[in-house]
């Protein structure tokens, strides 16, 4: 029979983590950021000038290994060239021009939106290696408890490390992750991986979760709920693996972002936490263990019933023998 105390402890962890996340939400949003940082902030390789405003997001979203960019002329000045078939990226800026006001005859400064094009260093060849800074790498080591959770997940999807993005591909059923050494710390790597593994539990051959399977894009409620589910589930798994619960600030701020999409309707946290618990149970194989235990108990029950039946038959036989005597 399953230890009831163990079940209560698991339930308590879910409640504690959920409540802690809500506490963080009530304090306000902590700006969420990607925790793999070796790419650095986008900047020009020659001048070292960091791009600003919307350019930070536009260039970061391209997910290059290193965020160093060059204009076409700068590539040529370094003796390099752009690889065949590579496309440039826009850098947007405001330029102030002076124009005379027709009525007042006074000069006015008017902002004009302009852009120029750049290439990432990975799109180029022939650039001297000494001109390219080495990527930032952190000496992160695997966390045994986290690895155990991953290794023991039933029907686990394939995990690859080919792109600088963390995502779950539901069509081909695999998870892609940046390498562990590219994260600020090991805990961040496992937090991101747990998030994607929770997504993977929604696959049709696992929990068949409608929010994953029926989502039609990032602006839909189903997508937002699925993201809430994945982040709540990641929080549960981090806590299960012994990662300090104080590490939940980023989870909370990410969750807040999706709650704002859902107009801060708190019922979505309750629903998402329920889905996250199911996903976490699946990853930790808790539900399967319960089923197995249930089967064992059923067998034991059948055995006990059989034993009782045999005893009754023996008793009846003994009584008959005694009567005959």
Image (cartoon, helix red, strand yellow):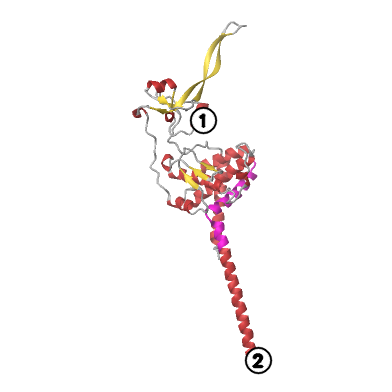
Q: Quadrant of the N terminus?
A: bottom right
The outermost residue toward the left is 130
Residue drawn at 64 percent across, 84 percent down:
316
- Inspect the magenta stretch and tell me whether residue 46 lies in it: no
- The image quarter in which residue 162 lies: top left
* Viewer-proximal residue among 258 and 27: 258
Q: CA distance from mark 2 to mark 1?
A: 94 Å
Q: Are marks 2 and 1 in contact (CB under 8 Å)?
A: no
- The image quarter in which residue 131 lies: top left
Rate crowding at label 2 as few (under 14), some (14 to 19) or many (20 or more) other CA atoms within 10 Å.
few
* Viewer-proximal residue among 247 and 199: 199
Rate crowding at label 1 as few (under 14), some (14 to 19) or many (20 or more) other CA atoms within 10 Å.
few
**Residue 234 rendering spot, x and y as whole percentages:** 53, 47
* Viewer-proximal residue among 222 and 159: 159
Residue drawn at 51 percent across, 45 percent down:
174
Placement of 49 over or under 152, stated as above or below: above
Q: Is residue 300 visible?
A: yes
Q: Which residue is mark 1?
A: 57
The outermost residue toward the bottom is 325
Magenta span dominant secondary structure: helix
- Inspect the magenta stretch and tell me whether residue 285 lies in it: yes
Magenta-tinted stretch: 264-292
Q: Which residue is mark 2?
A: 323
Q: Quadrant of the C terminus?
A: bottom right
Q: How many marks?
A: 2
Q: Is residue 246 visible?
A: no
- Secondary structure state at the residue bearing disc 1: helix
**Residue 154 rendering spot, x and y as whole percentages:** 52, 54
Left or right of residue 126, residue 279 in this image: right
Left or right of residue 312, residue 78 in this image: left
**Residue 279 rendering spot, x and y as whole percentages:** 57, 50
């Amino acid at each position: 029979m399953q230890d009831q105390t163990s079940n209560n402890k698991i339930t308590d962890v879910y409640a504690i983590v959920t409540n802690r996340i809500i506490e963080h939400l009530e304090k306000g949003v902590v700006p969420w950021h990607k925790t793999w940082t070796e790419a650095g902030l986008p900047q020009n390789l020659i001048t070292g000038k960091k791009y600003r405003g919307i350019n930070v997001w536009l260039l970061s979203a391209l997910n290059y290994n290193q965020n160093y960019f060059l204009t076409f002329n700068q590539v040529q000045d370094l003796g390099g060239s752009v690889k065949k078939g590579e496309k440039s990226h826009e850098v947007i800026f405001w330029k102030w021009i002076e124009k005379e006001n027709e009525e007042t005859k006074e000069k006015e400064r008017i902002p004009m939106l302009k852009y120029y094009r750049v290439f990432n260093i990975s799109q180029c060849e022939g650039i001297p290696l000494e001109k390219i800074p080495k990527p930032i790498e952190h000496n992160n080591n695997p966390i045994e408890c986290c690895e155990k959770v991953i290794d023991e997940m039933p029907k686990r999807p394939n995990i690859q490390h080919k792109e600088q993005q963390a995502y779950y591909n539901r069509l081909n059923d695999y998870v892609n992750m940046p390498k562990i050494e590219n994260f600020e710390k090991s805990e961040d790597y496992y937090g991101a991986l747990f998030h994607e593994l929770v997504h993977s539990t929604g696959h049709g051959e696992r929990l068949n979760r409608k929010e994953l399977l029926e989502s039609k894009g990032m602006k839909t409620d189903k997508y937002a709920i699925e993201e809430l589910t994945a982040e709540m589930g990641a929080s549960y798994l981090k806590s299960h693996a012994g990662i300090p619960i104080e590490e939940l600030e980023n989870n909370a701020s990410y969750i807040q972002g999706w709650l704002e999409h859902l107009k801060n309707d708190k019922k979505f946290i309750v629903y998402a936490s329920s889905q996250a618990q199911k996903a976490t149970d699946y990853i930790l194989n808790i539900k399967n263990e319960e089923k197995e235990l249930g089967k064992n108990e059923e067998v034991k029950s059948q055995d006990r019933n059989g034993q009782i039946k045999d005893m009754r038959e023996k008793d009846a036989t003994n009584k008959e023998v005694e009567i005959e005597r």
